[in-house]
Amino acid sequence: MKRRNNRQDAIRDIVRAKSIHTQRALVEELQAIGFNCTQATVSRDIADMGLRKLSEGIYVLAEDLHLQRMVSEFVTSCESANNLVVVKTQPGTAPGVAAAVDAASLPNVMGSVAGNDTVLVICDELEGADELVNLVNKLRSAHK
């Protein structure tokens, strides 16, 4: 059970960090970080975790679907400054984007503050801010 949980945590990190299009690519990513698993095992993990494949062909976590929709529709830019992430949105949409960020329960995200067209996301560390910027930019490009 512990190995499966560790593997699924690794899958969560990989899917959030990279654009994964196939189960085979996911198996290769897992093997690169030391998990010895088969495509059948990964297929079961995908079903257990509720991963979804977007029309663009990339896997996303079920809990990130709402975030993906909000980001792809309303976010215009995303940049980090130390452990802070500044997300620019279309006018009037920042509160909805901030709510989606908070609801996704992303690792390293401590909380967010929204104005009219800007969301400030506070991360617990510099690396967490960089990971969030990468995720937002990945989700922004998913529908473009």
Image: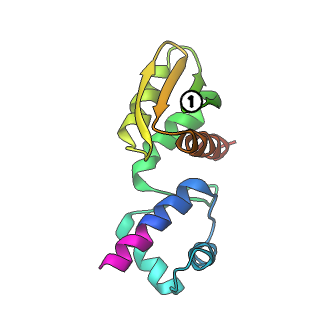
Residue 135 at x, y = what percent? Answer: 58, 46
Residue projecting furthest to the right: 144
Residue projecting furthest to the left: 1
Residue 119 at x, y = what percent? Answer: 51, 22
Residue 141 at x, y = what percent? Answer: 67, 43
Magenta range is 1-8
Image label count:
1
Locate the N terminus and report the quarter of the image it occupies: bottom left
Rendered position, 108 above or below 36 = above
Q: Which residue is mark 1?
A: 85
In this rendered view, identify the residue nearer to me: 105 or 35. Answer: 35
Rendered position, 121 above or below 107 = above
Q: Secondary structure at mark 1?
A: strand
Is residue 21 rendered to the left or right of residue 65? Answer: right
Residue 88, by quadrant, is: top right
Residue 49 at x, y = what percent? Answer: 38, 65
Rendered position, 37 above or below 140 = below
In this rendered view, identify the residue nearer to me: 46 or 110. Answer: 110
Residue 56, by quadrant, is: bottom right
Crowd class of label 1 (few under 14; some 14 to 19; many from 20; radius 10 Å): many
Judged by its main secondary structure, the magenta piece is helix
Residue depicted at 57% across the width and 44% down the height = 127
Q: Does residue 110 belong to the magenta stretch?
A: no
Is residue 109 rendered to the left or right of residue 144? Answer: left
Residue kind at label 1, given as amino acid type: Val
Rendered position, 6 above or below 16 = below
Residue depicted at 32% across the width and 77% down the height = 2
Answer whether residue 32 is visible to the viewer in this image: yes
Residue depicted at 62% across the width and 64% down the height = 20
Is residue 111 rendered to the left or right of residue 116? Answer: left
Residue 102, by quadrant, is: top left
